[in-house]
Image: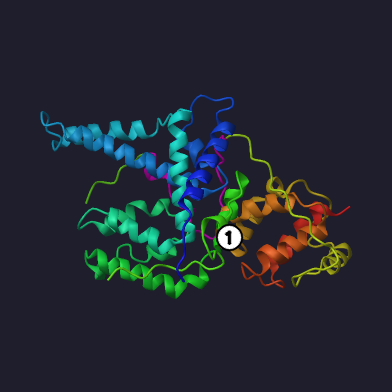
Amino acid sequence: MTTQINSNYLEKYAKDYAEIVCDRFYQNRQFITGQDIVGLTASVQVNFFVIRRLFELWQQELQKLKSNPYFDYRDVAVHEALTQFMNVLSRRIKVERNHLQPLVEFAVQKSIELATNPVAFYQAEIDKAPSQKINEYLAENKRYYKWHPQVITFLIDKAGFGQDPIAYKKAIAANYQAIKEQLESVNLLLATLGEIKAFDLDAYIENAQETEAPKPIVEEEKQDSFFDQIESEPASSEPEEEKVPEVAPAPEAPQAQPISQSNFTGKLDPNQIKSRFAAESYKGMKGLIGELSESLAINQRFMFRKELFEGNDDLLTHALKTLDACKSFDEAVEVINVRYLTELGWDESSEPVEEFLHVVYRRFSD
């Protein structure tokens, strides 16, 4: 299927999104730091693309210094001193609003492109890679790929593809076709942007129900910098305490759409669930809890993210805020039925789903 992209809508959306983000953050602040950017919005991908752009500018500054013809930047002592200086500089990120806003606009556009057409996005990444250093480029940038990383990360450190960009592009397209059913839903990824401003996929892409990939196109020293510390979440099965940076006030929770409580569309029946939980002690957990987005224990958040939300903290955070905005348990269950049970392939009889439903029940039980 051929799709038509509305670039005007994308540019307008990104501009509006960036303005709202900056309005909120800079209301009582003059600068933003690197750690602030990591948690700037509810969309991890947007945040990390801002960080990536700063990383690119940081590298450009380093290359500019090295291009000076009057000094020997190959000297070991100079190299070590320069590396230390650049690392210190990277940990002193300090950005005013007029400089951050275009970075956010760019990050939003790239995030949407990645969500809706990962093949084209990652093939463009191959075009950006330096000649004969495609693997190194991908390995260096993988920390910034938060959406659809499965499409590209299998290529990293695979010597069999040589250094032929066309071979890489073909491999990306072929891999996407093989795993596309396992990738996160485009709608769920874009829903994380809704914390700031709802994104209209129909306005952006014609025939938005299905996006199809285009046809495939027929060593430096490790540096201990701020950018080297920006990594994906650890793969360990043990929950770890998460560091929460100081960020702007949390955006308002999305308003749940009114749902008829007399016609439930999914497998979960709220009346049966309420009856079951009301009659059970459920591991000793009783009583009301506050907002879901603030009340989950660390181990619960880890389990829900891993078992129910495909390891994507964006999706979990958005789901919790959406459920918090519901007016009743019945409405919350219907949201789960419509948005998560089928989309994410939940087994309604599994222990993680049972525990998730129980904390939602405790949020709304009288």
Residue 174 vertical position relative to residue 246 in the rendered view, above or below? below
Rendered location of residue 276, percent (x, y) = 85, 67
Q: In this view of the protein, can residue 284 be seen by the observer?
A: no
Q: In this view of the protein, can residue 55 be seen by the observer?
A: yes
Task: Residue at 49% x, 50% y: name it.
Answer: 45
Q: Is residue 68 left or right of residue 199?
A: left
Asked which quadrant contains residue 333, the reply is bottom right
Q: Is residue 245 left or right of residue 319?
A: left
Bounds of the magenta segment: 226-247
**Mark 1 crowdedness (10 Å alpha carbons): few <14, some 14-19, many ≥20:** some
Rendered location of residue 331, percent (x, y) = 79, 58
Residue at numbered disc 1: 187
Amino acid carrying label 1: it is Asn
* 241 in magenta: yes
Q: Is residue 77 left or right of residue 136?
A: left
* 86 in magenta: no
Residue extending farthest bottom: 178
Task: Residue at 33% x, 65% y: name it.
Answer: 155
Rendered location of residue 8, percent (x, y) = 48, 48
Asked which quadrant contains residue 315, the reply is bottom right
Task: Residue at 56% x, 55% y: name it.
Answer: 203
* SS for dot 1: helix
Task: Residue at 67% x, 72% y: name it.
Answer: 347
Residue 253 vertical position relative to residue 173 in the rendered view, above or below? above
Out of 235 and 266, give the one closest to the viewer: 266
Main structural element of the magenta stretch: helix, strand or loop?
Answer: loop
